[in-house]
Image (spheres, rainbow, N blue to C red):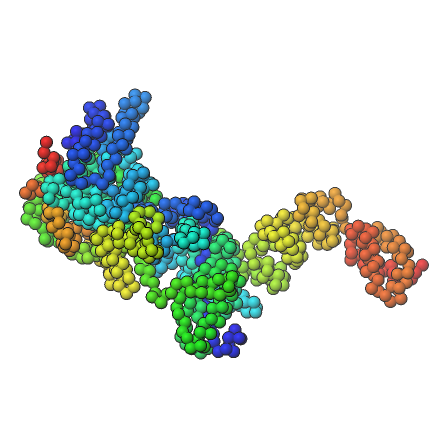
Amino acid sequence: MTEQAESGWETVIGLEIHVQLNTRSKIFSGASTQFGAEPNSQACAIDLGMPGVLPVVNAAVFPKAVAFGLGVGAEIGMTSVFDRKNYFYPDLPKGYQITQMDYPIVRGGKVDVLLPSGITKTVRLTRAHLEEDAGKSLHEEFQGATGIDLNRAGTPLLEIVSEPEMSSAVEAVAYARTIHQLVTYLDVSDGDMSQGSFRCDANVSVRRIGTPDLGTRTETKNVNSFRFLERAIDFEVARQIQILEGGGRIIQETRLYDPDKDETRPMRSKETATDYRYFPEPDLLPVVINEKFVADVRATMPELPAARRQRFESQFKLSNDDATFLSSSLPLAKYFEQAGQTAEDFRLAANWVRVELLGMLNKQGLDIGESLISATQLGELLRRIKDGTISGKIGKSIFDALWAGDATSVDEYIESHGLRQVSDSDTLTPIIEKIINDNTQQAEQYRSGKTKLLGFFVGQVMKETGGKANPQQVNDLVKTALDQAPP
Amino acid sequence: MHKLSIAEQRQCLQRGDFSALELTQHYLARLETGGALNAFITTTPELAISQAKRVDAARINPGRAPDTTPLGGIPIAHKDIFCTEGIRTSAGSRMLDNFIAPYNATVVDKLNDAGAITLGKTNMDEFAMGSSNENSYYGAVKNPWDPARVPGGSSGGSAAAVAARLCAASTGTDTGGSIRQPAAFCGITGIKPTYGRVSRWGMIAYASSLDQGGPLARSAEDAALMLSVMAGYDPRDSTSIDTAVPDYRGALNNSIKGLKIGLCSQYMENIDIATERSLFEAVKVFESLGAIISDVELSNTRHAIPAYYVIAPAECSANLSRYDGVRFGYRCEAPADLKDLYKRSRTEAFGKEVKQRILVGSFALSAGYYDAYYRKAQQVRRLIKQGFIAAFQQVDVLLTPTTPGPAFKLGEKTNDPIAMYLQDVYTIASNLAGIPALSFPSNPHGGLPTGLQLMGNYLDEATLLNVAHQFQQQTSWHKLSPAWEAP
């Protein structure tokens, strides 16, 4: 931003995000939405737009769209209407897309976006509407011809349209991440960007600072990673500024981001603006939902990320960083809360989840949902650390045992392996005395001021007790013993 | 056998006077001699024979329960707009000349389940666009009353086939009069039910918000038998009405004493003398049966045709986009590129009238024209609907002519689209409003049939069939058979 400010240009960005709803069947047919099937094996007569077929709306899309609307504080369209958007393209079987134009299901709304700088920016939404996805054109595999795969045709989408209120790639990405977090939290979408479940179109324009009117925008379509989104916008901003500074003008067009070359390039020109000839879809009746429907959706909604983050900070006294991190996804947040509750110590749980558990998961390339240790198991383990039954070090070895499947019950494992922490001074004192007697030279040095040697003695005691001694207690006892005059 | 009504044929079949196979073979033989009428696009003798054998097997086998199917063994024909599994379904277009439907329309399934025998698929105006059946890729259909005249359209083949006794009854579709006008021209009875009463699943769409399937038959009684089977809720059609189907046949003999019949001056403009005379003769018959005749105003009637010729083409322009040469249907030879594929496939395979309506519809939906045409037409449509609702608070049914005059000569109006469109001046309003309407034969003139129309309130098909049946108990116009039929 500063860079741009220096250059005298400002950037205006609006995003259209296509979120694939995680319903089992398509929005207007009973065909499966499973990703990665053989081309055209999941396209029924309706998806193919065969003569005489009719769409029937999959009722599962409405609670999801409404949940999103409530999540962004939008007005819910109690009557929403499907429309036909007409254009010819080989992967659009009917020659029109069924979408919502004048009466979308979600109207307005806003999200608070936490920027990397720590500042929170509010981005307003224009709308979000339900529509069907098109198929895919496969240009590569067919020499000189184009293959059409209609498996994706009819997949339910929620298109989320923001106001043009972001002023840098960083802001746009932060906004997109916030929406991503929300739709996965609300179980609206699996959010899997590699499978195209979350695709961003970036409308980008630049203008001289102080200019009232928006510059001509380009639309960079179907960016399917946050990193690419940032790079695509940065490229596009630089390109536009360069053209304008060279005295050129921006052509309103659709562009495509090529990650290999890290550039955007024109896809099709919108100079002759396509007239989509929208009109209400006569094969579908207007969708009317009532207050009870909305209330029912609201009742089943989980706590949203921002609220959860604040609660983690205030209720559990987590640092802002821990709270942000642990509320970033619903499964992670749920895991953490469960572990913390069982352990009766949320800060301890926060630390273990972030360091030990995520360290292990990352190493193995697993998701939180695939953890081999349940949140309750981890909580039980932490409870035993907290109440002094075991030391943290022993705790880590039990963690490994749990992960490896060698242990199931933490308490049983502690007992059967004799791992209970020794904090009984009657047991520890003779051991300490013996170690001091065996190392008189070091004891002398300690007493003459080399107090760093305390660690050496503690280490020896821990070694002697197989790590089971309570380190804090050992520390105190060793210190007392050494400070006494030699016999 | 072909002179018998459906009820009589059923009786004979049940008594064993003849078998379903004999009846079917009798009709198949008639089809061959009736070829000159060009009423059929496809005949299905093998299917018909196998269906007839199945009905006979069920009837003769003493172990089986008696045949209670309502139409067991009755040979019928389907307008070639209803998809029939494994059988070409062309919609009268070169575009679908090679299209073998992979599924049955709901109407076809229901009639199959009721034991009806499918003799074949009847000729029609291309994609149901026309009022003379001259717009068929398969050539014009000839009126059996006078082969120099048209049978009406778009269900011209269905009407001619029933009139010429080539089948006991047939299915048709009616978007602006396409069942009633040919029924009137061919001297038979046809009913367009309430929009949503008969499923549109598998019925190739022309104008989705107006299209409605219904039967063409020799009498109101036969039409009632057919409609009882065809009507009913279908979850695959979102515009289908979910209410029980009444006993149409049971209501046929209700007395119409005290029934209020409305006459409307707006439906007498441009009427020819013979038709007008037949209307007043009918009024006398109804009065003799105790009906009460009164006048009703429907002041917006004159706006029906212009509104229709915006809405229907608008919807058709989108409905016909799927015919692009990509997935099914006609594809031009050696397309140079995608645009060429679209352009030539559609140019070569669509007829003139279809192209004209696609163009009109695309224009009406275009940015800048939408409000003036499409939106305005929808407003007119609401007014027409309100007019009918008000009228049916005063009367039970409306009695009007079906057409301004009798069947015209082949080629007479092909170069005058407005004159052709005016054929539907009395029938179109009920499609716009969605109310049921029936055409029944009245006193013919000069060897040509005339038809009268009854319009009723929503879902009140039973009363229309009842009133027409009562008329047919007093008259024998419906029993006349065309000259073609001379022994």
Q: Would you identify the image quadrant in which residue A451 lies?
A: bottom right
Left or right of A61 on screen, residue B339: left
Q: Is residue A397 above or below residue A207?
A: above
Q: Given the current orientation, which residue lies at the most extreme right position? A: A487
Count of numbered labels shown in the rendering: 0
Pick the front one: A339 or A358: A358
Q: Is residue A64 visible?
A: no
Decide if residue B160 is on the left or right side of residue B361.
left
Expressed as whole percent of the image width and height from the top left, the position of residue B211 reads 25, 48
Residue B18: x %, y % from top left: 20, 25
Q: Quadrant of the C terminus of chain A?
A: bottom right
- Give residue B337's position: percent from left, percent from top: 35, 56
Seen in the picture, residue B150 relative to B419 is either above or below; the reply is above
Q: Is residue A120 above or below residue B131?
A: below
Left or right for A440, reference A127: right
Residue B186, given in percent of the width and then of the height, sits at: 14, 41
Identify the residue at image location x=78%, y=51%: A468
Question: Where is B481 relative to A309, above or below?
Answer: above
From the viewer's side, name the closer residue of A20 and B254: A20
A372, B148: nearer the viewer? B148
From this viewpoint, is residue B144 visible? yes
- Please tell me which residue is depicted at 25% across the width and 55% down the height of the picture: B358
The residue positioned 49% from the left and 68% from the top of the image is A235
Q: Quadrant of residue A164?
A: bottom left
Q: Is residue B251 left or right of residue A229?
A: left
Look at 41% across and 54% down and name the residue there.
A144
